[in-house]
Amino acid sequence: MNSQRLSPALGVEIVGFDAREPSDDDFGQIHEYLVEGAGVLVLRDQTLEPEQHIAFSRRFGDLFGEAEPLQNTVTRYLHPDHPQIFRVSNKNADGQPLGRSRAGNYWHSDVSFRLRPASVSLLYAIELPRIGGDTLFCSTTLAYDSLSKEMRFFLDRLEARHDFAINTQVGFSHEQIETDDLAGQNAAIHPVVRRHPDSGRKGLFVNPGNTSHILGLHEGESRMLLAFLYKRCTQPEFIYRHSWRPHDLVIWDNRCTMHYAIVDYDADRYLHRTTVIGERPIPAISTD
Ligand code: SIN
């Protein structure tokens, strides 16, 4: 296995690893590289059938679409034979064009509106435009670290609401939203700053795709603070831009990153994503 850093902020690339049947030692190393890459790992040259993609993903934990269903609204994007696989594509399962896919075309952290949001997501490239269709990743850990001590102290004590209803406003699914998704399990309160279970580092955990507001602040205060935090997270120094190659499997950690799919292409783009159910976010300060 050969590794190299992809940017000063985040990202490690691995060549010479086969995700089909890794030993426990190799998987342990992959896990370490993910932490070293600050939450983004690029595994080159993979050949993964859906079953193999799912089996590898299960090594990270239980999967959405299996242990817990995703929202009804997105079921039409799931693989017809494998509900664990989200088809990120501008074609439907029959190969018919869907028009410009807006999936992920906004900064977000996957499924953050659930009580146990996604830990890692694994996206495998099957068909790519010759040019364009990159994905941006930003480090919410570096963004947090860059703030003043006083600001970090203030944020450490705050909570925010995450709500799928916000996603329907900014996301790709707003035209065909299933209204039963707007109640119940698709909204949750989480700490604004969460501690990563592996690295122990603190990072911001709010995102424009799913966060509705910060609790306890006036509406205008919450809006301004969120806008400030998003700007800080997405400043260029904290970003890695991934230009996809066929057979890339990119793993990102939603607990310390956000991502954004750039829609700047007209050709077909088709990837498979699995999404691992994480733990309840660990608050920055102990609540004992
Ligand atoms: C996603 O947000 O899961 C999709 C990212 C991408 O299509 O690049």
Image: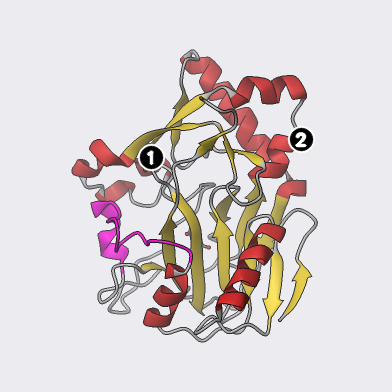
Find residue 169 and report its image quarter: top left
The magenta stretch spans which residues? 60-78
Q: Is residue 101 visible?
A: no
Pick whichever, 96 or 181, lies toward us: 181
Q: Which residue is mark 2?
A: 146
Q: Residues within 10 Å of mark 2 (few under 14, many from 20)?
A: few
Q: Closer to the camera, 63 or 220?
A: 63
Q: Quadrant of residue 145?
A: top right
> Tag 2: residue type?
Ser
**What is the magenta segment's predominant secondary structure?**
loop
User: Element under label 2?
Assistant: loop
Residue positioned 53% across, 60% down in the render: 263
Mark 2 and mark 1 residues within 8 Å of each other at the beta carbon: no
List x then y, in percent, for residue 208.
51, 39
The answer to whether the beta carbon of the residue marked 2 is less than 8 Å from any atom of ligand 1 is no
**If the image is split into quadrants, where does the N terminus sit?**
bottom right
* Residue density around tag 1, few if under 14, some if 14–19, many if 20 or more, within 10 Å: some
Q: Which mark is residue 243?
A: none
Residue 4 visible to an observer of this rendering = yes
Mark 2 vs 1, N-terminal side? 2
Q: Position of residue 173 (x, y in %)?
A: 33, 51
Tell me the residue that label 1 is attached to. Answer: 169
**Distance from label 2 to label 1 (Cα)?**
30 Å
In the displayed structure, would residue 109 be above or below residue 31? above
In this rendering, the answer to whether 251 lies above or below 197 is below
